[in-house]
Image (cartoon, grey):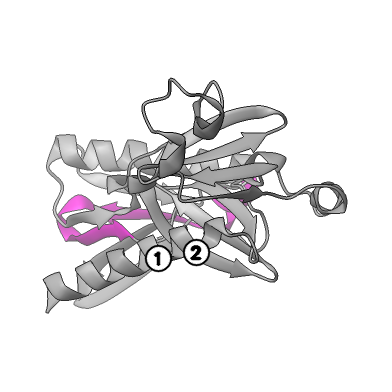
Amino acid sequence: MQTHLWVMGFGARDPHRLLARFQISIPVSRIVSISARVWPTLELRWRERGQLHRRVFGAPWSPSESWTPTAAHFATERTVESLVTLAEDEGWPGLRRGWWDEPSVHWEPATTFPSSNPNYRVPADSVIAEGRGLRGWRRFWLDMRHHARKSAPESVMVTPSLVYAQFDGQVFRMPRSFLRQRYEIGRFRLYRFGRRTTLVLDRTSVATTALDDQLSRRAATRRRRSA
């Protein structure tokens, strides 16, 4: 059984510089909690000489800076997941719920939009909202700001159970049940599905109403359960 946790600044581009900056050895028996609500960070709390210490490792993803996570964020995610798996296998104390409990979801390829396919299992009249995504100069603006196009669709459609989006001419879909959070970024709204899959729409898009209503109902349900 591992008795000490050695921690250095993970998720950075230059690990040698971080190693020179700090390196911590924490006896596993002194760990109070391992948790994190903000993807892909890790929060450790431990007791030493009668005092409670806390440190957050990794840089949180900021949707306002990048509509999709960077390679450094994914590297941090893999490191944290490995540590959490080790903590579970070794039976470390203080392991709490965190972003690692959220599913890691991805856009699924779809043949076409449901309204264009009469044989699709969801009839066209079940489409709740559909509209244009970011096109023209707005897509040029994405390139200027280094935002990934895979988060901003050209067209979008919402059914009772799925969100459809067209990226670079290809149609994908995502179960609405994975919708977790909305971020306001200027004239845009970014929706997060699962841990880190994103959908960016103009605030005037009719699809935002259906997604916003869903998030409001989810929040109301959580409030009733916690009351």
Q: State the residue position of label 1.
A: 213
Image position of 210 with respect to 90: above or below: below
SS assignment at label 2: helix
Magenta segment range? 16-36
The amino acid on which the numbered mark 1 sits, given as a three-letter code, is: Asp
Q: Residues within 10 Å of mark 2 (few under 14, many from 20)?
A: some
Residue 215 appears in the figure: yes
Quarter of the figure that contains the N terminus: top left
Quarter of the figure that contains the C terminus: bottom left
Q: Position of residue 73 (x, y in %)?
A: 55, 46
Q: State the residue position of label 2.
A: 209
Q: Position of residue 4 (x, y in %)?
A: 26, 46
Q: Residue at x 49, y 64 (%)?
A: 209
Q: Where is residue 127 in the image (x, y as percent from the top left)?
A: 46, 44
Residue 14 appears in the figure: no
Q: Residue at x 47, y 24 (%)?
A: 118
Q: How crowded is mark 1: few (under 14 residues within 10 Å), some or many (20 or more)?
A: few
Q: Position of residue 206 (x, y in %)?
A: 58, 59
